[in-house]
Image (spheres, rainbow, N blue to C red):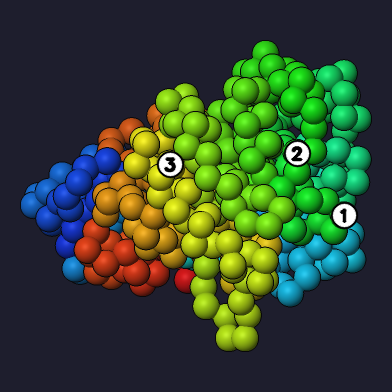
Amino acid sequence: MTHLTVSERRRLTAVRAGWLFDGIGGQLVADPVVVLEGARIRSVEAGVVPPPGADVVDLGGATLLPGLIDTHVHLAFDAGADPVASLRARADEEVVAAMAEAGRASLRAGVTTVRDLGDRGYLSLRLRGRAGLPTIVAAGPPITVPQGHCHFLGGGAEPTQFGVRRAVREHVDRGVDVIKIMASGGTLTPGTHQHRAQFDREVLCAAVDEAHRHGLPVTAHAHGTSAIEDALVAGVDGMEHVTFWSADGVDVREDLMCAIAERRIVIGATVGMVPVPGAAPPAEIACRLPAVRANLRRLHELGAPFVAGTDAGIAPMKPHGVLNTAPAALREIGLGPAAALRAVTSVAAGVCGLGHRKGRITPGFDADLVAVQGDPLTDPSALQRVVAVYAHGARVRR
Ligand SMILES: [Zn+2]
C-alpha cells in the first residue's frame, strides 16, 4: 500500500488548454500544457506533447489562469438578506459548516484563495488547511471599539493604546495571518457612523505598531476621511473600501490620495457583484457610488496598488465566489486588461503573503488553476464562464 501511495503522489496530470494567462504577462500564451505533480505545478510549456505516462486533461479552447484570490471575504456571512441576524442565530458548529459551504462555493467559481477579514470568534482558523476548501488567510474577528463596527464578531477592544495592543497580541497568540482593524464605522452596524473614525489616532498607531512588531500586516476598514488619514499616519499596509465617505457625500482629498499612492498602501477596492432581481444597494450608498468610483480612479492614476476585496457574504448581491465579476469593475475604474487580472491573481497573492507560491502559473507554484471559456483580457465576463478548477492539484467537483 505504501508503494501505491508513493506512485500515486508522483502521478502527473497534464492540463492542455487553448490559452494561458500566467498571472503576470500582458498577453495570453497559446497552446499551453501545464503539468501538475501532486499539489504543485511541475512545468509550463506551450505547443508541446504531454509527458509520457501523464493523465491528460484536454480543456479544448479554454483559457487557463491562476486560481483567483479574493482579499476580502466573510465566510461567516451567508449572503442572505440579513447576514448579521442569521449569524447571530447560529451556534458555532453551524457557522463552521456554513463557512465550509461558502468556501466550496468560492472554489466552484474559481476562487482558490480567500482572505477572511472578519469571522466570529476565530472560526475561520478551524477551516484553514482543510481539504476541499480554498486556501484561507485569516484575520479572526476584526479589532473594533466596544459596540463599534462589527463588534458582534467578538473583536471589541478597549479603545486605548494598551487595549488595542492587548487585542493584537491575542490575535497573534491565536495564530491569525493578518490584522484587520475597523478604523471607521460601517453601514452594517447600526449605531456606528461610516464617516467617523472609531479610534483616536494614537490608538490606531499603537495597534499597527504592535502588529508589525509581531510581523503581521494590517489592513484597515476605512470609509471616512479622518479614518483614512489616521490609517495612513499609522502606517497600515492596506486599506479596505477607501471611499472618503462624509456625512452628506464623498470627500475629494488629493493630498491624502497622493500620500496613499506614494507609500504604496494597497487599496482593497470593494468591487464585484451579481445582479439580484429586486435588490439594489441602499440609497445612501447608491447616490455616493459615482464619487467613490472617481476617487478610486484617481488613486489608480496616481499609482496606488489595487486588489479586489469583494466583501463576499455581506449581501445577496455578493455571494461567495463573486470575485469572478470583479475584474470587469476594476476595468471601470481604469485598470488595464492585464492589470485587472493581476489584481485578482499575482498582486493579491503578494498582499496575502503568498506571492512566493500563488497567483502565477509557473513551475514550483501551487497547482491552483481556473479554466474559463473565452478571452478574459478582451472580455472580463469570460471569468464567469468557468469550465474547470484545480485547487492544490485536485480537480474541484462542479
Ligand atoms: Zn468586510
Tell me which corner region of the image, top left, top right, bottom left or bottom right, holds residue 139.
Answer: top right
Q: Which residue is mark 3?
A: 299
| Element marked by disc 2 | loop
Badge 1 element:
loop
In the image, 232: left or right of 294?
A: right
Q: Is residue 137 above or below residue 78?
A: above
Q: Is residue 6 above or below residue 340?
A: above
Where is residue 350? Give x, y as percent.
44, 33
Q: Is residue 268 above or below residue 372?
A: above
Q: Residue at x 27, y 67 (%)?
A: 379
Given the image, on which type of amino acid does mark 1 rest?
Answer: Gly
Which badge, 2 or 1, is on the more N-terminal residue?
A: 1
Residue at numbered disc 2: 197
- Disc 3 from disc 1: Cα separation: 30 Å
Q: Is mark 3 within 8 Å of ligand 1?
A: no
Q: Which residue is mark 1?
A: 191
379 to the left or right of 308: left
Q: Is mark 1 within 8 Å of ligand 1?
A: no
Q: Residue at x 87, y 29 (%)?
A: 159
Specify the amino acid type for callout 3. Answer: Leu
Residue nearest the viewer, comparing 105 with 380: 380
Q: Can residue 50 be seen?
A: no
Instruction: Return the disc, 3 or 2, that comes first in the chain's sequence.
Output: 2
What residue is drawn where x is 62% and y is 23%?
Answer: 233
Q: Percent x, y for residue 161?
A: 84, 19
What amino acid type is highlighted by mark number 2? Ala
